[in-house]
Amino acid sequence: AIHICLVGNIENRPFTDLQLKRLADLVAGLQQQLQIPPSRVRFSNNLQSARINRSHFDPAAFTRLIAKAQTNG
């Protein structure tokens, strides 16, 4: 298992576009190097919590960003 810890308080402020792009690039790179299929990439319960405003972090949109990073990388 690989865990990536993000430090911040997205209950109050969303990640920037650049932060999300860099994270997507990291995840896509790890997937490629370690042959991890998209079905094995999961989000912590904290990011799926009802407390998190979907405009601050949308797992589905981030999954699309990872796919885009894979095609560009």
Image (cartoon, grey):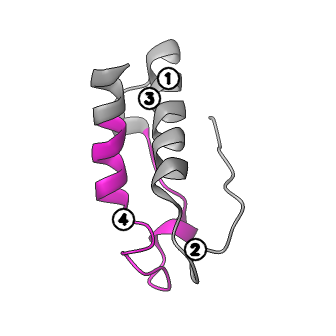
The residue labelled by disc 4 is 58
Q: Secondary structure at mark 3?
A: helix
Residue 4 versus residue 73 in the image, above or below: below
Image x and y of residue 22, in percent: 53, 40
Label 1–label 2 contact, CB within 8 A: no
Q: How far from the left and from the top, in percent, is residue 39?
A: 33, 37
**Circle 1 — which element?**
helix
As rendered, which of 46 and 57 lies closer to the eye?
57
What is the span of residues highlighted in magenta in the rendered image? 41-67
Secondary element type, mark 2: loop
Residue 18 appears in view: yes
Question: Where 28 falls versus 66 (above or below)?
Answer: above
Residue bearing the label numbered 2: 10
Residue holding disc 1: 29
Mark 1 or mark 4, earlier in chain? 1
Going from N to C along the chain, the mark reached first, 4 or 3, is 3
For badge 4, the amino acid type reads: Asp
Residue positioned 37% across, 52% down in the render: 62
Mark 3 and mark 1 residues within 8 Å of each other at the beta carbon: yes
Quadrant in which the C terminus appears:
top left
Q: CA distance from mark 4 to mark 3?
A: 17 Å
